[in-house]
Image: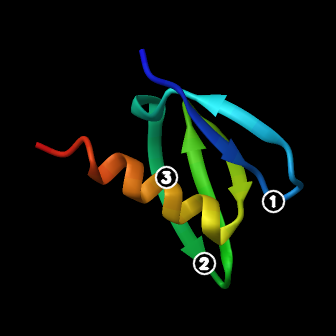
Amino acid sequence: MEFMEIMDNKGTLHYINPSHISGLCAVEGKCKINLMGQDYMVTKETMEDVKLHLMSFRH
């Protein structure tokens, strides 16, 4: 199982399994990741990292 490091908008690092991400959204400059029903507010840079990571696993 591969874990990914993400940083929330408060600067806290989280290690997550990317396959558990159920949604991404960016509204009014705020970026949100839904991870197993829990929302995490993240930086725009983290959002881009997550999107790139998920795209690399597309079939």
Mark 1 is on which residue type?
Answer: Asn
Where, by quadrant of the figure, is residue 32 drawn? bottom right
Q: Circle 1 sits on which residue?
A: 9
Q: Residues within 10 Å of mark 1 (few under 14, many from 20)?
A: some
Q: Circle 3 sits on which residue?
A: 50
- Secondary structure at badge 1 equals loop
Q: Residues within 10 Å of mark 3 (few under 14, many from 20)?
A: some
19, above or below 11, in the image: above
- Secondary structure at badge 3 equals helix
Horizontal placement of 54 versus 18: left or right?
A: left
Q: Which is more foreground, mark 3 or mark 2? A: 3
Indicate which disc, 2 or 1, sits on the residue closer to the N terminus. 1
The foreground one among 7 and 24 is: 7
Horizontal placement of 12 versus 58: left or right?
A: right
- Are circles 2 and 1 on residues that touch, CB within 8 Å? no
Measured in 3D between alpha carbons, the distance from the residue under mark 1 to the one under mark 3, in whole angstroms, is 14 Å
Residue 13 place in picture, x, y as percent = 78, 40
Res 27 label: 2
6, above or below 48, in the image: above
Measured in 3D between alpha carbons, the distance from the residue under mark 2 to the one under mark 1, in whole angstroms, is 14 Å
Indicate which disc, 1 or 3, sits on the residue closer to the N terminus. 1
How are the colours assigned in the image? Answer: rainbow
